[in-house]
Structure formats: C-alpha cells, structure tokens
Amino acid sequence: MDADIAVLGAGPAGASAALAANGAGARVLLIDDQPRPGGQVWRPKSAAILDAPPTPETKSGDALRRAVAQSGIVHLADSRIWTMEQGDTGWHLHLVDAAGRRGRINSRSLVLAPGAREYVQPLPGWTLPGCIGLAGATAMMKRDLLPPGRRVVVCGTGPLLFFVASEIRRLGGEVAAIVTPSSRWDWLRTLPALASSPGLAARGALWIADLIVAGVPILWRHMVTRIAGTEAVQSVEIRAVDGDWTPLGPPITIQTDACCIGHGLVPNSEPASLAGLQLRFDETARYWAPQARPDGTTAIPSLFLCGDGLAIRGAAAAEIQGRLAGLSAAFGLGFGTGPDDALRHRQAKAARFGAAMEALSHPRPGLAALTTADTPVCRCENITRQEVEAEIAGGASSVIAVKSGIRTGMGACGGRFCGTAVARILAVASGRPENEVPPATARPPLCPVSITTLAGDFRYEDLPIRKPAPL
C-alpha cells in the first residue's frame, strides 16, 4: 500500500495532521492501534452507553471521527507499526493488526503522533488489583462510564487528579480523599498561563469547586506512600511532604477499595528514536524527548512530529500542532501552501497553558523516596529496587546494561512503565545527573509481535538443506 503521507496515531494530534494533509491534497494513511480515532483524550464511548449524555471530550472526539470518516483518509484501525526504515524514496512501515496479519506501507513522508504514557513512581502496593493509573481510570470512565471503585482515593499530580475525582463523583462513586504533593501556591502560580485558555481554566475551577462543596477532603502537600491489601486494595497510607516532596511525619490510614494514582506523563519517544531522531533531556520536565520545531519539522526532512509525543502540552495544543505538522508535511511534497502565522500563534498560546499544567507534575527529589528496597520497579518481571541497585553495584552503568543483566523492561510493555524509574535509580546510585542516563535504545519490534506473524508463510520444510557430504 502506498501513500504520500502516513500518520502514526489517531489522537487529537495525529488525526488533525491527517485531516490537514488530506485537505491540502495529499494521499494520507492514518494508522492507529484503537478501533476508532480519538486517542486517549477523545476516546469514544462503548456501544453499550451511546445514549449517555455527551461530555466536552465526547463532543470533540465525535466531531473528529466524523471529519475523518467524511474525508479521503484511509484509516487503518487496530494496527500497529512494529518497525520502520527510511529508503531512497521515503519510508517503509511494517504493520501488524489485531488478528496478527502483517502489512507493509510505502510512504513518501511520515508524521509521528504517538502520544504520551503515564508515569507512576513505584511504591509499595502499586501492583495490587484496584490500583490504577489516573490516565487508565480516565480511559475506563470515558469508554464505559464506570468508576474504578465504590470508595476511591485519588492521588498524584496535575489537573488529571481533579478531573478523575470529579468524574468518579459524577458516575456515582465516592471519593474518600484527594491527595497531592502540590501546594495551593503551586496552583496559584499557574494563573498567568491559565489566562491564555479561560475556558479550560474555568472548567478546572468548576471541578475543584464541586469537590470542595461536596466535602471531599483535599490533602495538599501529602502523598500516598503505601497501598495495603491482601488480594486487592483495602487501604492507603498517607504522609505529609515538604517542598521537595520528601515524606515526613506520622502516616494517616484511609480505608478504600481503589486507588487512582499518577505522577505526570512522559512522551512516547520510541517511534521517533527508531526513526532516527536524537533524544534530548528536558532539564525542566525531567524526561527524554525527541527534537522537533513547533511546526512539526525535524532534522530529517521527510519526518514530522506533533502532540504529546514531542512534549506534554495537552489536547488543545496537540490538535493545533497536528494541523501544523500535517500542513508542513503536505507542503514539503508540493501540496498546499503550508502553515500560516495565525495557526502558529494559536499553537503557541495553547502550549503555554499546557506547559503550566505540566509543570505541576515536574518531579522533585523526594518523589524517589516512595520506592522502598522491596518495591517492584519492573512489574512485568517483578524486579525490585534492591535488585536493580545490586545490578548497578555489580557494574551495570546504563539502562540497557541493567536490562541485559536482570531483564527489566523485557516484559510485554517493553520498558515503557519501568524505564524512567530504572533510569532515575541508576542516576542516583551512580552519582550522575539524569541527563547522562539516556533510555534504552529503541529497537524493533515497537510492540509485541508473535514469531508466527513474523514468519508469515515460511515453512521450515521448504528450506533448501543440502545433503550431508560423503565421508
């Protein structure tokens, strides 16, 4: 299958890039691992609840899905790119769909919009059933209108904290407490940036006001330091923290049957890295991310980036940047007139708001104290912090060396959940700054692929094996 432009990711950034490029006259393929466009933020409802009242997210998502359906875009749903390479005439993308079928796309240009992944600092009990990430809880509530539990503690950083708590209440659940290491002053400092998006700021203020009126306890400058239970979450232990988020003082125990937790988002940088882009350490946000300009252009002329896979700026900025990237990609192939200054200005304005919200989740030194010696850091392989530190003491000086020695990141997630935590442990244990501890090198496959799928129609019996030489 051939195209002028292939777009990876059908969230606000990717789908908007595809629509902009298609509108400029390019032949566009939109590739996504979900059945319908929208991504995590504008996730569609399940078929069982289509009659439920719409939310701002479902309205935006439905408009996006209609636009994609009415365009000339070829949408490859339930499909993942597992490897890619750049050739003389463009990009060769190798896909696998939900049924395990392989495919190949040849595209003159490539737009990457892989989004972000949630970061949760490992802490005792975080692998118990009933403990779910803030982003995971958001997806579940948007898709199925089901709260993550009957009585829920919501903890972590950033605006998603209050959205999740508000949605739990709206869907009939009880919020036992909201726990955040941020202070009221941390939030007040964002007010100048919030003025750039008054509609979003007002919506966030309504969430908080609703929770306060409902009497939901908001524990500022506190963190959940332990999640307890035998076969599932039964209670959480909460402690006050100082300005660096270091736990102090006696613990407070709250009974609960679920805990939603999250400490910010990290760009999903593996596709860009595999495509050949260098990663840069963001000293402020404390994560590694690929480099691209605001209009999506990169050091590789036929490769474009947009959305939270580049920097965490939220759905509003991602949608506009997606349009910039799509127009830039199309213009590079001779389609359209490229992005204009008005669109660039709108993106910069939306990005200011997103950056202010992201700043609330920038990790502070005390966050690492949540991970005790016997806490599993790698959930797939059940590898604890003390095992990681022992490997480092034995000579492992990189994330890839730790991975080779004790299999961190060798599970189904490919290190996406534990890689950041392992890198931070390595930096502290080796006395190096984080910018000297890069993530593991991205290699194919980007997603789990079965050997049967890779082999295709290959049969061992068809190998031309020579007869043994005569003695």
Image: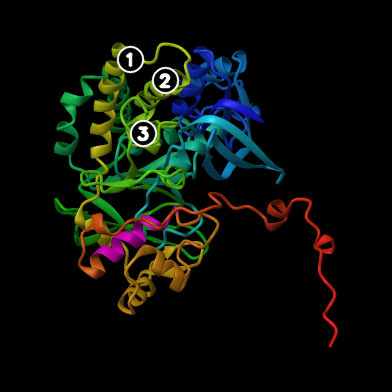
Front label number (3 vs 2): 3
Pointer 2: residues within 10 angstroms few (<14), some, or many (20+)?
many
Prevailing secondary structure class for the magenta stretch in the rendered image: helix
Frontmost residue, 375 versus 326: 326
- The reply, left or right, for residue 80 in relation to residue 392 is right
Would you identify the image quadrant in which residue 294 lies?
top left
The answer to which image quadrant residue 460 occupies is bottom right
Examine the rendered structure and indicate whether residue 239 appears above or below residue 405.
above
Identify the residue at horizontal 59%, vertical 14% (top origin): 71
Query: The residue under label 2 is which amino acid type?
Result: Arg
Q: Which residue is mark 2?
A: 323
Q: Earlier in the sequence, mark 3 or mark 1?
A: 3
Element on which disc 1 rests: helix
Name the quadrant of the C terminus: bottom right
What span is in magenta? 416-427
Q: Could you tell which of marks 3 and 2 lies nearer the N-terminus? A: 3
* Residue hosting label 3: 298
Q: Residue 141 at what x, y percent from top left?
A: 50, 35
Quadrant for the N terminus, please: top right
Point 37% across, 28% down: residue: 296
Count all numbered tags in the image, as a single digit: 3
| Tag 1 residue | 343
Query: Is 76 above or below relative to 239?
Result: above
